[in-house]
């Protein structure tokens, strides 16, 4: 095995050389359990913790290691290591932390492709699909839609679902599969490239872990069936894990996400709703909100069917959520700055009175 088999490339190599960091061992985070990490290296797998300095300088969860990160470590006896530095990430999948207004949760890092898995029976939700796409597009990660459990519906029902997706989402591959009958799995395996990292996203119970087990060829991820009473998934994955396939691809599984809260998605909305943004160029007012203005080209396009009404409503909802998140982040930073100023002034006061 080489580092390249784990996804290492010139992006990281050049950074290490340019910053004279070659004395450290290099590894990739393959699992995270609170603040204990499993690091895969050419010397084996090691349990690891971050150094006190790394903990002290961290300003938020984004500054801690996440599954997919490349890290510089010192290896000690008893299969233990210390993480000194996280190498710069070329992509990050993140969401707003559930129940928090302005906190960010890092899902995975250094991802090339995202498998967005939705089952065609109970889980299919095109609005949620667009949310995942916005997150992926913001991170410059190539999305691939996986429709699972196609053995539970007819061919006509599957065709209707695919047509519904294509009416709102263009230029994104769609691969229908069944872990039970194995339909579509050969097509999926054919697109997995050696040394590339794939993140598996989706709700609980859609078949993510079963899919990884099938692709890996062994039972490496625990799975559990859907509750018949609630129709909700009881997915056994409680933390993120990275596995390497025999074909050379790298997969990251994630706990099922009931909430897909949007964080700082930058241009993710524009790439997800390209049709809306292109038509908005014809709006009468440059600051048009596309909700009530006279001369709004977007509203006109919705009324004449050029823009799907469901996509339009989902766009407005996601835009509002994005703007709210950004405003709470600004407010939190202002409070932190004000608090820092108070502490600084108090220290000056104590120092001044001590001299007296």
Image (cartoon, rainbow, N blue to C red):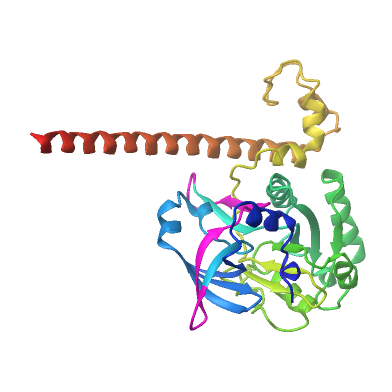
Q: In this picture, is 220 found above or below 25?
A: below
Q: Is residue 13 left or right of residue 20?
A: right
Front position in the image: 344 or 105: 344
The relative height of residue 3 versus residue 93 in the rendered view (above or below) is below
In this rendering, would 335 be left or right of 46? left
Q: Is residue 312 above or below residue 188?
A: above
Was residue 332 drawn as part of the magenta stretch in this picture?
A: no
Q: Position of residue 284 (x, y in %)?
A: 76, 15
Q: Quadrant of the N terminus?
A: bottom right
Residue that appears at 79% across and 23% down = 281
Q: Nearer the viewer, residue 179 or 112?
A: 112
Magenta highlight range:
75-102
Res 217 visible: yes
Q: What residue sits 58% from the left and 35% below the top?
A: 323
**Residue 206 visible in the displayed image:** no
- Horizontal and vertical percent position of residue 207: 72, 71
Quadrant that contains the C terminus: top left
Where does the image place residue 80, in percent across and percent down from the top left? Answer: 50, 77
Instruction: Answer with left or right where residue 292 lies relative to residue 279.
Output: left
Q: Nearer the viewer, residue 316 or 135?
A: 135
For residue 196, what is the image quadrant?
bottom right
- How many numbered discs sit on the rendered protein? 0
Residue depicted at x 60% and y 39%: 322
Would you identify the image quadrant in which residue 70 lies? bottom right
81 lies left or right of 208: left
**Which residue appears at 68% of the width and 22% of the height?**
292
Q: Position of residue 344 (x, y in %)?
A: 28, 36
Say if the magenta span includes residue 80: yes
For the residue pair 171 and 205, the one nearer the viewer reads as: 171
């Amino acid at each position: 095995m080489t580092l390249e088999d784990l996804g290492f490339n010139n992006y990281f190599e050049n950074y290490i050389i340019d910053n004279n960091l070659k004395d450290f061992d290099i590894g990739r985070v393959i699992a995270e359990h609170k603040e204990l990490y499993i690091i895969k290296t050419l010397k084996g797998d090691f349990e690891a913790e971050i150094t006190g300095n790394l903990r002290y300088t961290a300003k938020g969860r984004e500054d801690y290691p996440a599954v997919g990160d490349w890290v510089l470590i010192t290896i000690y006896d008893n299969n233990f290591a210390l993480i000194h530095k996280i190498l710069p990430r070329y992509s990050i999948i993140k969401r707003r932390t559930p129940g928090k207004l302005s906190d960010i949760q890092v899902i995975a890092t250094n991802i090339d492709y995202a498998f967005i898995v939705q089952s065609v029976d109970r889980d299919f939700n095109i609005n949620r699909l667009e949310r995942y796409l916005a997150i992926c597009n913001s991170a410059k990660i190539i999305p691939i839609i996986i429709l699972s459990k196609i053995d539970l519906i007819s061919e006509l029902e599957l065709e209707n679902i695919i047509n519904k997706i294509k009416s709102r989402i263009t230029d994104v591959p769609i691969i229908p599969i069944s872990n039970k009958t194995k339909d579509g799995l050969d097509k999926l395996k054919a697109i997995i490239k050696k040394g590339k990292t794939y993140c598996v996203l989706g709700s609980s119970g859609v078949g993510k872990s079963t899919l990884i087990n099938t692709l890996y060829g062994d039972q490496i991820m625990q799975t559990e069936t859907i509750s018949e009473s609630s129709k909700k998934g009881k997915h056994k994955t409680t933390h993120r894990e990275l596995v390497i396939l025999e074909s050379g691809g790298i997969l990251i599984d994630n706990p099922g996400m009931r909430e897909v809260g949007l964080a700082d998605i930058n241009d993710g909305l524009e790439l997800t709703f390209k049709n809306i943004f292109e038509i908005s160029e014809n709006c009468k007012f440059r600051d048009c909100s596309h909700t009530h203005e006279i001369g709004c080209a977007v509203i006109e396009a919705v009324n004449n069917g050029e823009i799907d009404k469901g996509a339009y409503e989902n766009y407005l909802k996601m835009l509002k959520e994005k703007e709210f998140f950004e405003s709470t982040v600004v407010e939190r930073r202002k409070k932190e700055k004000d608090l820092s100023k108070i502490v600084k002034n108090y220290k000056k006061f104590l120092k001044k009175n001590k001299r007296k």
